[in-house]
Every structure is written in C-alpha cells, then in structure tokens.
Image (tube, helix red, strand yellow):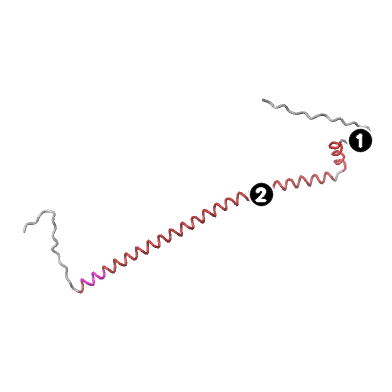
Amino acid sequence: MLKRKGTKTNNVKKINTTYVKQQEQHLERKQREKKLLIRRLVAFGVLFSIIVGTLSLYFFQQQTIHSEKESEYEQLQSELQAQLEEQEELEREVELLNDVDYLLQIARKDYFFSKEGEIIFTLPEEEEEPSY
C-alpha cells in the first residue's frame, strides 16, 4: 500500500489491561479535580471582586461625606469666630454705655442735646458724585 504525503494513519492500538484502566480513571479524576479547582477559583475571584468593589464604593462614599463635614466644620468655625468678635464688640459697647461721658456724647450727637449756651448746626451730608 502506498502512503500519501500529509496523511496520517493511526496504527496505535489501546491495551485493555487493569493498569491502563486505572491510569485512565486517574487521569479522568485529575481532570475533574482540575475543573473543580478552576470553578472554585473563578467563584472566589468573583466573590473577591464583589467584596473589593463594595468596600471601594463604601470608602469613596465615606470620603465624600468626610469632605462635606470638613467644609461644614470650617464654615461653622468662621461663623463662630464672627459671633465671638460680635460678642466682644457688644461687651465693649456695654462697658462704654456704663460711662456717663460716653452717654452724654451719644445724646449730643444723635439727639442734638446741647450744653447750656451751645448752638447745634446740622449740615447736609455730602453725596459723592458717581464717576463715569
């Protein structure tokens, strides 16, 4: 018989002994174990990805909340500082209002009270002209 180039003939026969059967069963078992291992690794990989994704999302949400709270804190600190300054100013004014000379000065300025023999003239306030 003539063989053509490029064609293969399978002349190998299988030996049906118990050893060969055991080896085939062993190979099949190893392949099943390998498939199960791959499935477990894929399942754990998916689970790990879900956990990492969830934790990342939670981290970024907390980071956003933290930055909002930090800006709110800074705003409240500036408001507190303004309130403290206003309180100091009001306390100074209370101290001045306890002074009789300061009260007389305010009465003369705002309510046009005068000393004996004093004449008060009021001048119209000058308005600034807009510059073009």
Residue lying furthest top = 132
Q: Is residue 119 left or right of residue 54?
A: right
Give percent across and percent down for residue 117.
93, 32
Q: Element at badge 2?
A: helix
Q: Which residues are magenta?
A: 20-26
Q: Which mark is residue 77?
A: 2
Distance from the alpha carbon under mark 2 to that under mark 1: 47 Å
List the single residue furthest toward the bottom.
18
Q: Amino acid at mark 2?
A: Gln
Q: Is residue 24 magenta?
A: yes
Q: Which residue is mark 1?
A: 115
Q: Nearer the viewer, residue 65 or 127?
A: 127
Residue type at tag 1: Lys
Relative horizontal placement of residue 53, taking residue 77 as reference (left or right): left
12 vs 94, left or right, is left
Residue drawn 43% across and 60% down?
A: 48
Whether 77 is among the magenta residues is: no
Q: Tag 1 or tag 2, which sits nearer the N-term?
A: 2
Relative image position of residue 40 (x, y in whole percent):
37, 64
Quadrant (top left, top right, bottom left, bottom right) of the C terminus: top right
Mark 1 burial class by Cα count in 10 Å: few <14, some 14-19, many 20+: few
The residue positioned 88% from the left and 43% from the top of the image is 100
Q: Secondary structure at mark 1?
A: loop
Residue at the image position 35 percent from the left and 63 percent from the top? 39
In the rendered image, the quadrant that contains the N terminus is bottom left
Residue 122 appears at what percent x and percent y? 84, 30
Crowd around label 2: few <14 · some 14–19 · many ≥20 (10 Å): few
Where residue 26 sits, quadrant-wise, is: bottom left
The residue positioned 84% from the left and 37% from the top of the image is 110
